[in-house]
Image: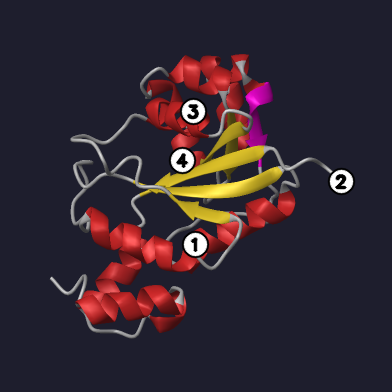
Amino acid sequence: MNKKDTIVVFGGSFNPPINSHFSIAQQVVNECEQVEKIIFIPVNKKYEKDGLLENEHRYNMLKLVTDKNENFIVSNIDMNGNRSLYTIETLEEIQKQYQDKNVWFLIGSDNLKELHTWKRSEELVSKYRILVMERNEDKILDIIEKNELLSCYKENIIKLNEEIRSNFSSTYIRSQIKKQKNVRYLMPDEVYEYIKRNNLYME
């Protein structure tokens, strides 16, 4: 049996966190035997994104779910500062916390296409393994071959199982809440009750 020596960083707005976020994370744990923990890292409210709910609410909703799964953790590392961290900064901070572990970064193939434009991108792909989920009709090998930086470090880019695909629909869920539609079965019960209790996403 493989040693569980890897921490996977899963960043996002989680606005709100929904079933597919947790489903993807659990599938990663199931598929990658060396993965010990998935760390959910919600972005700072100062991240430039329309309609982003306050840090406290998004953190609380994630924590309600992650506290019930021994493989999941939520971190407020990106929420503590006066700006949103660059991905490389986040990974470096997590590596400091888990010095004896490998740190991997989980993204969708849409983000892989833009990775070469990110801050300190070469350092990012050379120092850390990148776990990639295919989205829509994307083919990860095609994306790598068309990009000089990714081609140089292709051994650090890991394609997840074909069946693990990411098509998150937090945007759709927010729109349904505004229309007062029932979204109970699209997210964990804890998140659904929290949204109802705090009257979130109505405006």
Amino acid type at image mark 1: Thr
Q: Could you say whether the residue bearing mark 3 is in a helix, strand or loop?
A: helix
**Mark 1 and mark 4: Cα distance apart in space:** 26 Å
The span picked out in magenta is: 155-159
- Residue 107: x %, y % from top left: 50, 41
Between marks 4 and 3 in the image, the one whose residue lies nearer the viewer: 3
What residue is disc 3 on? 96
Amino acid type at image mark 3: Lys
* Label 3 CA crowd tier, 10 Å (few <14, some 14–19, many 20+): few
Is 156 magenta? The answer is yes
What residue is disc 4 on? 110
- Residue 158: x %, y % from top left: 66, 35
What residue is disc 2 on? 1
The residue sitting at the right extreme is 1
* Label 4 CA crowd tier, 10 Å (few <14, some 14–19, many 20+): some
Between marks 2 and 3 in the image, the one whose residue lies nearer the viewer: 3
**Mark 4 and mark 3: Cα distance apart in space:** 28 Å
User: In the picture, residue 52 is in which quadrant?
Assistant: bottom left
Q: Earlier in the sequence, mark 4 or mark 3?
A: 3
Amino acid type at image mark 2: Met
User: In the picture, residue 89 is in which quadrant?
Assistant: top left
